[in-house]
Amino acid sequence: MTILVTGGAGYIGSHMVYALVDAGERVVVLDNLTTGFRSALPQGVPLYIGETGNESLTRAIMETHGVKSVIHFAASIVVPDSVSNPLEYYRNNTVNSRALLASAVAAGVSHFVFSSTAAVYGNPAQMPVEETAPTEPMSPYGSSKLMTEIMLRDVSAAHGLRYAILRYFNVAGADPLGRTGQSTPGATHLIKVATQTALGLRPQMDVFGTDYPTPDGTCVRDYIHVTDLVAAHSAALAHLRNGGDSLLANCGYGRGYSVLEVIDTVKRISGVDFDVRLAPRRPGDPAAIVAGAERIRATVGWRPQLDDLDTIVRHALDWERRLMSANRRDAAGFPLPDHDPRGQGSA
């Protein structure tokens, strides 16, 4: 039985593919390589370049490879971009997911694990936010993900497809073995931006909003190591394969850090006091959001192994240094290794 990973050449998706291959699973990847890269994948994993909205392609992949489980990461994820370009987000995140679900039903897929987001909660009134909290997204990004959740529940009721919807919070860090990490140019993740600034790849970084109702006025988020996150996906899939009921669960640690706390951690770990500038709020950003994360622990037995901000930052810094080293080798004309850590594989 093969697992299809959509968006598997991207940041989180590539970590998922490595985890599945490490576990001896058969994996096939679909990615349009807009923000993902061929070289982010392990050797020998089949990669189809295309859109999840292409039903003839996705159904052919599922039938050719005997796909019984889908882990769906492919999406557009930048909240401010979704505010300025909502139709693109509804197309890529919602319309394309509808097409993927249609192919899954037609091909007889049994299990579907969906990468959702804490953005579906909007600006929750209580913290930590539990799965029972109202869903009131503040951005088209959050709305586009919530619409897919609704479709998935309805498809499950009509066709018996069992699912896990995992709403996760702020994903950061990199593979502890250095095999993959966040390689997308211009990525907006806070820890990515801060580590790049510490290494001199950006002249300064901005803090968007200092007047939120939080202890230091900056946004508070629950940061989860990408390796722990993919372990949650593996545990959720095992739960479904073992006959477990469909699942909706948060993925986070249940503890929040402010933007300034994260920046101070990056400065301390890197030893660099880089330039930080204060800027106005961005549209669509809630003040604080921290996971109530007991359900996934109780239901699938997930136990995080890297629940430590220093570790997350250290792994992110290690990855950025690997990218810098690869860029220097390339600029000097030296041959790059088969797995170029910049993730700049050709299409």
Image (cartoon, rainbow, N blue to C red):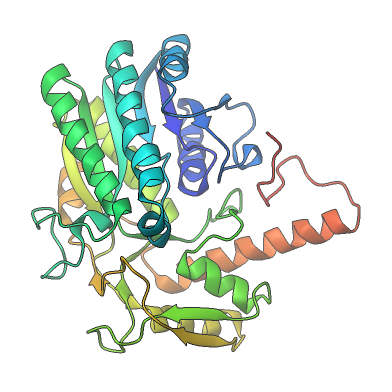
**Residue lying at 59% horizontally and 89% vertically, measured from the top left:** 273
Residue 226 in the image: above or below residue 107:
below
**Front residue (pair 125, 14):** 125
Question: Is residue 152 left or right of 220 when viewed as pictured?
Answer: left
**How many numbered circles does the render carry?**
0
x and y percent of residue 236 in the render?
A: 27, 38
Viewed as shown, does residue 138 lie left or right of 230? Answer: left
Q: Decide if residue 216 is on the left or right side of residue 273.
A: left
- Is 332 placed above or below 9 here? below
Query: 303 and 89: which one is in front?
Result: 89
Quarter of the image for the N terminus: give it: top left
Residue 104, position as x, y percentages in the image: 32, 19
User: Residue most toward the right?
Assistant: 333
Image height check: is 298 above or below 242?
A: below
Q: Quadrant of the C terminus?
A: top right
Please state the horizontal and vertical placement of residue 107, each as a whole percent of the image: 33, 12
The residue at the point 55 percent across, 46 percent down is 35
Estimate the x, y position of residue 74 in percent, counting from the top left.
Answer: 43, 39
Tell me which corner region of the image, top left, top right, bottom left or bottom right, holds residue 329: bottom right
Identify the image quadrant of residue 314.
Answer: bottom right
Which residue is located at x 68 percent, y 65 percent? 321
Is residue 237 visible from the viewing direction of this image? yes
Q: What residue is shown at x 13% (from left), y 31% (from top)?
A: 245
- Front-most of 102 and 296? 102
Q: Is residue 266 visible?
A: no
Question: Splitting the image into 4 quarters, where does residue 221 fall?
Answer: bottom left
